[in-house]
Image (cartoon, grey):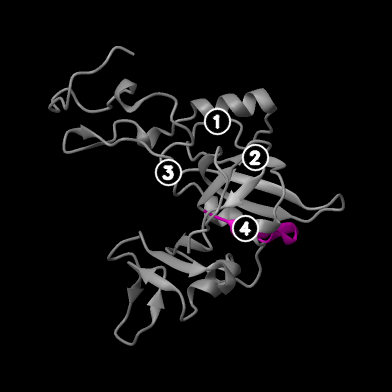
Amino acid sequence: MERQGLPLGGLALHAGLKVIPTDAGDKTVMIIGLSGTGKTTTTFTTQNASLPVQDDFVALMPGGHAHGTENGCFAKTFSLDQDFEPNIYGAVVKPTAYLENVYQDDHGKVNFFEESYTQNGRAVFGMSDLARFKEAQDVGTVDYLLILNRNENIIPAVAKLDQQQAAAYFMLVRPRHLRGRCRRGRQVPPGPRDEPVLPAPHDCRATGCSSSSPPTRSRPTC
């Protein structure tokens, strides 16, 4: 399902992409956010007759042109409701969708609200399974950048940033739940899905591990 033949030189971003029709023509919105911040939900909302393009990984090229990287979607399914997310729901319940960690009773009925096993249910489906979407090759340059963050101590809840503010926020934001992220005493290296950008080499970043964690290697001078 991967798209082939993209030019070199862009940024791989954990982001969604959607198009909003306006009186001044289509406007392209890129939505950057970590998993669980509402990126897919925001991408697939239908307000203002908007059309989803891509919900997970987007290539942003010099000059602002964006490319979708997949001809499909990898969506969370927990609490998926037809009334609130009809576009995603309609694709997920089709026979062509693949479901993972989704509760199914003895009669074969799927329950997206059942969490006795896990809340981390997922669905994979093709873009053609959606009732409405925009082809990635028909998208122009990005007009607006929306940065999602689930930290509850950010005031105001919604802010319109100028170019310098947006660049600073994009570079500096690091959600709290990523700090101190260790596995078996070793730091989990960040990737594009963890942070929008990687501002320093892995060895120059704080480990976030407890002092009792065994060292993995000597740290360089950064």
Disc 4 crowd, CA 10 A, few/some/many (<14, 14-19, 20+): many
Residue tagged 3: 193
Which numbered marker is on residue 145?
A: 2
CB of mark 4 within 8 Å of CB of mark 1?
no
Residue 216 higher or lower than 90, as above or below: above
Residue 58 higher or lower than 77, as above or below: above
- Looking at the image, residue 165 sits to the left or right of residue 39; the answer is right
| Whole-percent x, y for residue 202 in the image | 33, 27
Mark toward the viewer: 2 or 4: 4
Q: CA distance from mark 2 to mark 4?
A: 15 Å
Residue tagged 4: 53
Instruction: Name the image quarter holding residue 191.
Output: top left
For the record, the magenta segment spans 44-55
State the residue lying farthest toward the top. Answer: 221
Disc 1 crowd, CA 10 A, few/some/many (<14, 14-19, 20+): some
Which of the two residues, 167 or 49, is positioned nearer the viewer here?
A: 167
